Image: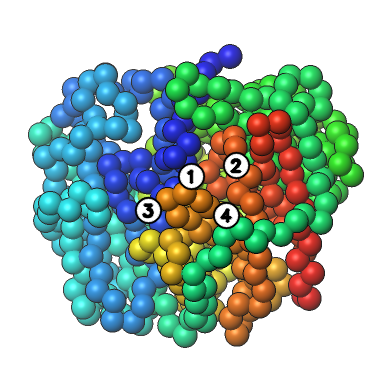
Amino acid sequence: MRSIRVDPGRLRLVGWGLGGLAAGAAVGICAVAVASAVAAGRSAASEKDPARIVDAGHLPPLLRLRGEPVTLRFNVFCPAPGDDPFGGAPCDAGGDVFVRAGRSGPFRPLPLRRTDDVADGRYAASVPADLAGSPEGFSYYAVLRNEAGGASITVPSGGAAAPQLSLPLEHAVEVDLGTHAFGSTRRADARVASAIWGTAPGQVGLVHGPAFGPIGPSAFDVAPNGDVVVLDQANGRVEHWRGGRLAAAVPIDVTGGIADMAVEADGSVDVLEPTGSGAGTTPELRSFDASGRLRSKTAIEDRTWSQLREGAEGPEVQQEPSEQWMPVRRGLAPLARAAQARGGHPGRTLAGGRELVVFRTGVAEARVAEVAGGHVVRAWRITSATPLGEIQLAEPLGNRLVVVVRPYTETQDEFLVLVLGDRGLERSFSLDSADWAETAPLARFRLAGSSLYQLGSTPSGMHVDRFDLEVNR
């Protein structure tokens, strides 16, 4: 079995895999970029003339406060021959950002200027006040160039057909968490799956790299029949747990790298792989029926991903560097990469056509909004005196919203579950991070019915715990 080398510190906190650009929920970008690079080996592109290579990192200002100045920042990279394809040095680059008020009409070109601020983005363009202050928000895309050879990249990849959208955050419900008190964690209502490390049925695989932390089952989901389905990618299978006991172990054709997973309404399983079938290809979505038979393989449009979820019309993938959710399949019909790019949008699709947009800004603030027709319907602004890591989960529960964030210090971290209503924070509780082994970056929690499920691990094995929220719908 191929060894997978992943740095746990890079996965758990909020580093950016492309040169330090400040991360939002983008802890996943770092994790999957690392996993993709290792699982795929060196990209074929990394062996070409470096002047023909260009890559980018960008954190879009998805949700903005009134009067907040807007500077769009990009880091542009040109890996040298033989370098890690995600670890290239900044290059002599340039480009333009094309911005317009709202979601229609002509774009205004803004040339990028070079700055010395590598951490926040070496190439920047300030959005004029008349565009940034539009009550409809503004939309934009960028064309970034490697000036040495002319290679270019469009971010997001759909360009003018699917530009990034930045919306004003008005009338948001304020949620001030104060200083997080570590050490008072809630016990689970039930342990619904538990397995020791191993290869036999009822056990789960563990992969050790030569210098980095262990990697266990990388994702899980809760099936419509209530089964907890665990992706045991190291052993090439999915395990179905029912009532705390193993009900079935179904072999599937996966690479063994860190992957995300979602279970569809008919019990079929979608697995988002870190790399495609051919050398140097982008990651791909593999779809299996309930018996484990491979139905399709679909390459995603962008270089990497941060998470997979089932949308109203099929699986959607949050893709990077576009920083958009893109459809990958409509029903049983896989979408070509160009069609995925044209369908890109800032939030995850909810029932009824709404989107849920999640934005992390600074080191201790998260903004979440339900969006309909390009307008914010309702929103929450979460602030904390304790730094907040990734937003592991944001899911509607009736007319409420469940959010799971990770407060952390230099020496400790926990997960904090928030149940948010129209008037603010209704209840909260802390959970042990239970992350001895690595998973996909944003795959540790699932919400099913009125229960929250957590995938955890210890040196002894893997477990899935259930926490009943008991929230009235």
Q: Which of label 3 and label 1 is nearer to you?
A: 1
Q: On the picture, is 435 further left or further right than 277?
A: right
- Mark 2 near mark 1, Cβ–Cβ under 8 Å? yes
Image x and y of residue 266, in percent: 79, 45
Name the residue furthest top: 1
Q: Is residue 152 visible?
A: no
Type of amino acid at the residue the image marks with label 2: Asp
- Mark 3 near mark 2, Cβ–Cβ under 8 Å? no
Q: CA distance from mark 3 to mark 1?
A: 12 Å
- Mark 2 is surrounded, within 10 Å at the Cα level, by few (under 14), some (14 to 19) or many (20 or more) other residues, namely some
- The circle drawn on residue 435 is 2
Type of amino acid at the residue the image marks with label 1: Arg
- The circle drawn on residue 292 is none
Mark 3 residue element: loop
Residue picked out by circle 4? 414
Q: CA distance from mark 3 to mark 2?
A: 20 Å
Q: CA distance from mark 2 to mark 1?
A: 9 Å
Q: Which of label 4 and label 3 is nearer to you?
A: 4
Image height check: is 458 above or below 279? below
Type of amino acid at the residue the image marks with label 3: Ala
N-terminal of the pair, mark 4 or mark 1, is: 1
Type of amino acid at the residue the image marks with label 4: Glu
Mark 4 residue element: strand
- The circle drawn on residue 12 is 1
Q: CA distance from mark 2 to mark 4?
A: 10 Å
Residue at x-position 74% and y-position 40%: 463
- Mark 4 is surrounded, within 10 Å at the Cα level, by few (under 14), some (14 to 19) or many (20 or more) other residues, namely many
Q: CA distance from mark 4 to mark 1?
A: 11 Å
Residue picked out by circle 3? 23
N-terminal of the pair, mark 2 or mark 4, is: 4
Q: Nearer the viewer, residue 164 or 108?
A: 164
Q: Nearer the viewer, residue 132 or 33?
A: 33
